[in-house]
Image (tube, rainbow, N blue to C red):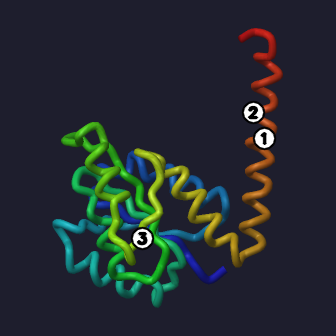
Amino acid sequence: MNEKVALIMGSDSDWAVMRAAAAVLKRFEIPFETDIVSAHRTPEKMMHFAQGAHENGFGVIIAGAGGAAHLPGMTAAYTPLPVIGVPIKSRNSLAGWDSILSILQMPDGVPVATVALNAAENAGILAAQILGLVHPEIRARLCAYKAELKAQTEAKAQKHRGAL
């Protein structure tokens, strides 16, 4: 597989949430690189990263950000790659709504796929699903994962059947 996933975040404090995406990518054996790329503190780095990501072997970008959360949208403005935004509830957040709305409310022509607040795990799964469109080995791992989820849910249902 040639493509890798970029896992970027605005601050090192975001790693507490974003590590869940890394765990998923490891599980599905998808290569990835992580970096801190702040839309506000290192805008030139963000721009250069986003502009060259497709030429540097990336196939999908997962961008996590809290507060004003401009990183996913600004990255999407500069790249032809799919960007998955992870809104993060930060210490000065408005219950996470500022991050959610900053990532979700993108203008026409600059889409960002947005997962739930702090849902980096889902961002990793979505990145795997995107890459699975052209990589059968990833798609097979996703099918096995979905079967595991089904089995776990059925086991829980069996355990609680009649007890609820």
Q: CA distance from mark 2 to mark 3?
A: 33 Å
Q: CA distance from mark 2 to mark 1?
A: 5 Å
Name of the residue lying farthest toward the front:
108
Lateral position of residue 31 relative to residue 118, left or right:
right
At 60% from the left and 57% from the top, the residue drawn is 125
Residue ID at (71%, 11%): 164
Kindly identify which residue carries mark 1.
150
Front position in the image: 68 or 64 = 68
The spot of residue 94 in percent (x, y) is: 23, 40
| Residue at the extreme bottom | 55
Residue to which mark 3 is pinned: 111
- Sequence-first disc among 2 and 3: 3
Quadrant housing the N terminus: bottom right
Q: Position of residue 86 (x, y in %)?
A: 41, 55
The reply to whether the C-beta atoms of the residues labelled 2 and 1 are less than 8 Å apart is yes
Residue type marked 1: Lys
Residue 99, percent from left and from top: 30, 51
N-terminal-most mark, 1 or 3: 3
Q: Amino acid at mark 3?
A: Pro
Left or right of residue 27: residue 79: left
What number is the disc on residue 44?
none
- Residue at which label 2 appears: 153
Residues marked 2 and 3 touching at CB (< 8 Å): no
Query: Does dot 3 land on a helix, a strand or a loop?
Result: loop
In 3D space, how far apart are the residues under numbered discs 1 and 3 (Cα atoms)? Answer: 31 Å
Tell me if 39 is positioned left or right of 113 in this view: left
Q: Is residue 157 above or below residue 67?
A: above
Disc 2 marks a residue whose amino acid type is Thr
